[in-house]
Amino acid sequence: MSKIMINSASEDFAPGVSQMYRRPDGWFIDLTSNYSGQKTKEAIRFDQIMHIELSNETTGFNTAGAVGWGIAGDVVLGNAGLLAGILLGGRKKEVTFEATLIDGRKFFAKTDDKTYKKMHDAVHH
C-alpha cells in the first residue's frame, strides 16, 4: 500500500491519510466523504476517477533514507559508497495533484512521485 495525504482544500472529502491498494477487481483508494456534513468511509475504485492532474512537484531530502543507503554503500563500496549512498539515497519527490471523479466530486492530495505515477497510469490506461 502507498500513503496518500488528502488535503482539506476539497469540500467533497475530509482531510487525512489514505491508502492506494490493489484488489482482484481493480485499484482502489480509501477516502472519507464529507457528504452533507456526514463523514463516510468509501473505497473509490480507480475507474470512478475521470481525471487526475499534477498540480505541483517538489524535491526534498529524506534523512532516514540517506543514512540507510549510506550504510549500505559503505558496506559494499567503502567510503565512496558511503558518500554516494548519502547523496543519492536521501532524495525524494513529492507530488500534489487533483483528481475528479465521474460523479463530479474532487479531491486534492499529496504523495510521492512513484505512487502518483502508478495512480495516473491506472486511471489513464
Image (cartoon, helix red, strand yellow):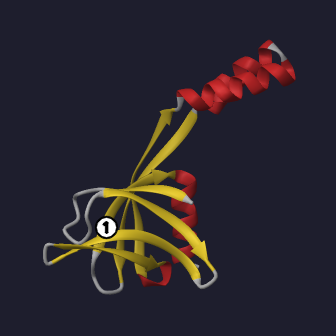
Left or right, 112 with respect to 16, comes to right
Please say whether residue 124 is visible from this viewpoint.
no
| Up/down of 40 relative to 110, above or below | below
Q: Is residue 33 above or below residue 93?
A: below
Graded by Cα atoms within 10 Å as few (under 14), some (14 to 19) or many (20 or more), the crowding at tag 1 reads many
Q: Is residue 122 left or right of residue 88?
A: left
Q: Name the foreground residue: 116 vs 42.
A: 42
Q: Tell me where residue 106 appears, x and y as whole percent.
A: 29, 72
- Where residue 22 sits, quadrant-wise, is bottom right
Mark count: 1
Question: Is 83 left, or right, of 109 in this rendering?
Answer: right
- Please indicate, yes or no, whether residue 10 appears anywhere in the rendered image: yes
Which residue extends farthest left?
A: 37
Q: Is residue 76 above or below residue 6?
A: above
Q: Based on the displayed image, in which of its 4 quarters is residue 11 positioned?
A: bottom left
Q: Which residue is mark 1?
A: 107
Q: Quadrant for residue 66, please give it.
A: top right
- The residue at the point 86 percent across, 24 percent down is 76
Q: What residue lies at 48% left-to-right and 84% top-to-bottom?
A: 47
Which quarter shows the N terminus? bottom right
What type is the residue that disc 1 sits on?
Answer: Phe
Residue 25 x/y as whole percent: 59, 85
Q: Position of residue 12 (x, y in %)?
A: 23, 72
Q: From the viewer's perspective, is 46 left or right of 25? A: left
Q: In the image, what residue occupies the spot 56% across and 74% down?
A: 122
**Residue farthest along the top direction in this orientation:** 79
